[in-house]
Each structure stands twice: as structure tokens, then as C-alpha cells.
Amino acid sequence: MNHEFWYLSRAAGFTAYLTLFASVALGMVLSTRAAQRTGRQQLVFDMHRFLSILAVAFSLFHVYILLGDQYFNFSVWQLSVPFASPYRTLAVAAGVVSMYGLLLVTASFYVRKFIGYRTWRALHFVTFVMYAGVTLHGITAGTDTTQTWARLLYASTGIIVLALLAFRLQHRLPQSQNWRRARMAAAGAAAVFALVVIYGTGLFAPTSTAQSSVQTASTTSVLAAGGTFLPAFSGTVSGTFTQKADANTSQLSMQARVAGDLPVKLNIDLATQQAAAGGQTQVSVNKAQRLDPASNALSCDGKLTAFDGGNATLVCTGAGTYSGVRMTIQASFAAADKTTVTGDLSGEMTRLS
């Protein structure tokens, strides 16, 4: 399965995020004396507006290029309506709502003379909520969050925005005692929000913990709000096997790890016995299990429904976080040597009625 559209969406998402960050930063600089002192206030404003337009363009591309991806087969409805996405519903909803907020704020540049300066300024306060939503969307829905560079990106941009916000409040609010308390309260609230985002999403957890967090999020029960349901997944198989055979019986045991869309570990045990001449083959052991490679927890239990040489089909019923799901997995593998097997795997999930 090709994933060009998924890669394009991820690249456009990060580009949109960085462009939005630059626009937000310039917008806050405009509201302080710093832009006035440079004498380039109009230039900064033009850059702020242009970057907002670019952020809109990359955001729309980030969202709707996924219509071409055959992995999730998103519809326009699922990409455009909050809570309609089958993939990390809450995290995607935060991104959809933030996209509409960005469209609203950017459109306000062109209707300012009709709505008045005060209304236009008030609309721009949506930017802070929208930026927080975009950041939350990127951290919780993005598949690159466990990468060090992505963590540093979110952390550095978030710290800069919070610092600029504190600088803006420091210079625009009155210097009375009550307003000083208000500034301290606002700074404390911003710090708490930052800690919730950082630690609640595992942003700075060790790699293994962060990956476990992402895997846990990706294997949340499909029956729960925000759970993930993967209509199709694929990957490459590598593992070990043992095979025994005598005149009347044969046995295949295999353990394999699968790297791809949905990391899995497979256990297959198959034992057959040949009846007397002219009789049919009897299966005495038929076990096929899908495990979480990180925790080794059972996520699907079933049996082989077809096995012919290096082609196997197994059907299993979800357990634990995958309760309520049936998985059909097809594997095509070949022996690389006496104990090693490699190949390809594809599968699909269906909901149990």
C-alpha cells in the first residue's frame, strides 16, 4: 500500500504549523511597542497577514490531500466535521475546529472596514485558543510526536508564544496592584496549561514511554470515544519458525514481528495429523494470536482459516483494547534460512455487530 498522500499531509501539517507560529508571533509583536520603535509596523503587519494566508493554504492541503489516501479512505464529511473522523477522533476534532478558527481570523483581515476595528481586534483573540488547539492536535494526532525533533519543535514554539504573550501583557496592562495580580494569575494559568500539554501527552517522556503512549492511544477500544479503528493495515514480516514432521504428523510454530501501519506480533501454532491411507488431515492444534509487541498483551485471538505453503490467512476476535473487533490477516512469507521467515502482511478490521 502506497502512502504518498499520508506523507504529503504530514509535511503540509508541519509547514502550516510553523507558518501559523510565525504569524502568531508577528501578531503579538505588532501589539507591543517593539514594532513601533522599528518604524516597520506596516511591513510587519503585511507579513503577519501574508503568513496567515499561507497557513490557511497549507492547512487545507494538509486536510484534504488525505482524500487520496487509501489507508483510511477518509470522506469529505469525516475531514470537515469535528468528531466525525475514525482516526483519533478527539485529537482530529481539535484540528478541525482550529482550522475553522484560522479561516475566520484570516477572513477578518478583508472585512475589517465593515465590522469595525474593535470587532476585528476581538476576533483576533480567537487566535490564542486556535493556536492551542492546533498544538494539541499536532501532539496527539501526529505520528511524529515521538521523534526528538518534533518534541523540540513543539516545545520551542510553545515557549516562544508564551513568552511573547507574557511580554505583551506586561506592557499593555496598567501597573496597579490588582493588574499585577492578574498578570501573575495569567502567567500561572499559562504555565499549568503548558505542563498539562507537555506531560499529559508524554511529549518529554523517554522514547520508550512516549512510544508506548502513542501505541496505547492508537489501540484504544474502537467502542470508546476517540478510539482508533483501522479499516486496513499492512507491513513487513520477519521472525523465526520451527517445523517438525514425521510420517503421520506435522507441526508449524512461528513467532513474527510486523513493522508497518500497525505494529504487531504474531504467534501461529498449527499441528496436523494425517489419518490412515485415504483419510482426511485432522487439525489437532490451530492457534493464531496477534499481540502488542511492546507489552506482549493479547489483542486478538483466533485461528488459521487457510494455509498453503507460504500463504496464511488468520481470523481473530479482538481482546482487551480491541474488544468488539474482528481482524482478518493475510501473510505471505518465505524461509530466509532454516529458522528465519520474512514476507509481507496485510489485514483489515471489522466491527462486530
Image (spheres, grey):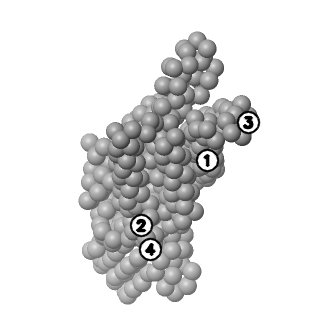
Give the residue drawn at x 62%, y 23%.
109
Q: Residues within 10 Å of mark 4 (few under 14, many from 20)?
A: many
Q: Amino acid at mark 4?
A: Ala
On the picture, is 107 further left or further right than 132?
right
Q: CA distance from mark 1 to mark 4?
A: 40 Å
Give the residue drawn at x 48%, y 41%.
169
Element marked by disc 4: strand
Q: Quadrant of the C terminus?
A: top left
Disc nearest the viewer among 3 and 1: 3
Element marked by disc 3: loop
Q: Nearer the viewer, residue 319 or 152?
A: 152
Q: Which residue is mark 3?
A: 39
Residues at badges 1 and 2 in contact (C-beta under 8 Å)? no
Report the number of discs: 4
Question: Counting residues from the N terminus, which is met first, the one under dot 3 or under dot 1?
Answer: 1
Q: Which residue is mark 1?
A: 18
On the picture, is 187 further left or further right than 110?
left
Element marked by disc 1: helix
Question: Counting residues from the N terminus, which is met first, the one under dot 1 or under dot 2?
Answer: 1
